[in-house]
């Protein structure tokens, strides 16, 4: 099984960025941990973080037909990006939406997601652990 992990804008700043909301782990820490977990599950994991909507969209298009599922934290694009939503719909790859923080306990503009209604599932509020939960779920629900 092949899973694509996508992280959106500002997540390259994890560890330094508002640690009270997002924790102290860096993105590197998270991806390393997840890669180890994937190895033990015989899952091939590929990762891309980008601050650019276009780069994320192009990566999603390129995944068509060669990825079994996507785990995505669209970060701020969660609340703004019809284009990223349409990219996911256009490739018909099932995906899990992850947020480190509990977006529902935060500002009202974070309560709406352009992704949740088309996601296989959504994991919010468990910090870095959320990615690990998503990978476990991906192994169970995505088929190849
Ligand atoms: C986030 C929540 C978003 O509202 C925010 O813009 C982020 C991170 C999270 O993981 O909690 O950048 O997606």
Image (cartoon, helix red, strand yellow):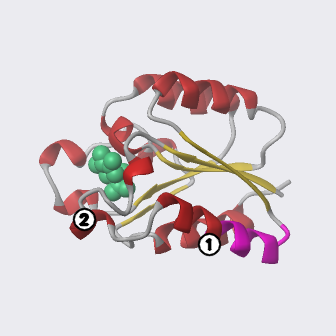
**Residue at left offset 65%, top offset 72%:** 136
Return the residue nearer the eye: 97 or 40: 40
Q: Which SS does the magenta portion mostly show?
A: helix
- Residue 21: numbered disc: 2
Residue 142: image quadrant is bottom right
What's the CA distance linking mark 2 and mark 1? 20 Å
Return the residue nearer the eye: 7 or 138: 7
**Residue at left offset 16%, top offset 57%:** 106
Please say whether residue 37 is one of the residues in the magenta stretch. yes
Q: Secondary structure at mark 1?
A: helix
Point out residue 134 in the picture as x, y percentages from the top left corner: 57, 65
Is the CB of mark 2 within 8 Å of ligand 1?
A: yes
Please say whether residue 108 is one of the residues in the magenta stretch. no
Left or right of 108, for residue 75: right
Image position of 109 with respect to 81: above or below: below
Can you say which quadrant of the picture contains the N terminus? bottom right
Image position of 49 with respect to 88: above or below: below
Mark 1 = which residue?
33
**Residue at left offset 69%, top offset 30%:** 91
Would residue 133 be seen by someone viewing this image from the given angle? Answer: yes
Image position of 18 with respect to 57: above or below: below
Return the residue nearer the eye: 95 or 43: 43
Point out residue 118 in the picture as x, y percentages from the top left corner: 51, 42
Q: Residue furthest front?
A: 16
Is the CB of mark 1 within 8 Å of ligand 1?
A: no
The span shown in magenta is: 34-42
């Amino acid at each position: 099984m092949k899973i694509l992990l996508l992280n959106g804008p500002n997540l390259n700043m994890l560890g330094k960025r508002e640690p009270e909301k997002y924790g102290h782990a860096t993105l590197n820490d998270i991806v390393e941990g997840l890669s180890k977990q994937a190895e033990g599950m015989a899952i091939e994991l590929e990762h891309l973080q980008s601050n650019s909507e276009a780069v994320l969209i192009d990566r999603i298009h390129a995944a068509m037909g060669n990825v079994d599922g996507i785990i995505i934290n669209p970060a701020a694009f969660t609340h703004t990006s019809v284009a990223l939503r349409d990219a996911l719909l256009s490739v018909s790859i099932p995906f899990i939406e992850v947020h480190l923080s509990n977006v529902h306990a935060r500002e009202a503009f974070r309560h709406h997601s352009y992704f949740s209604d088309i996601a296989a599932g959504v994991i919010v509020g468990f910090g870095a652990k959320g990615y690990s939960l998503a990978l476990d779920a991906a192994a169970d629900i995505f088929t190849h």
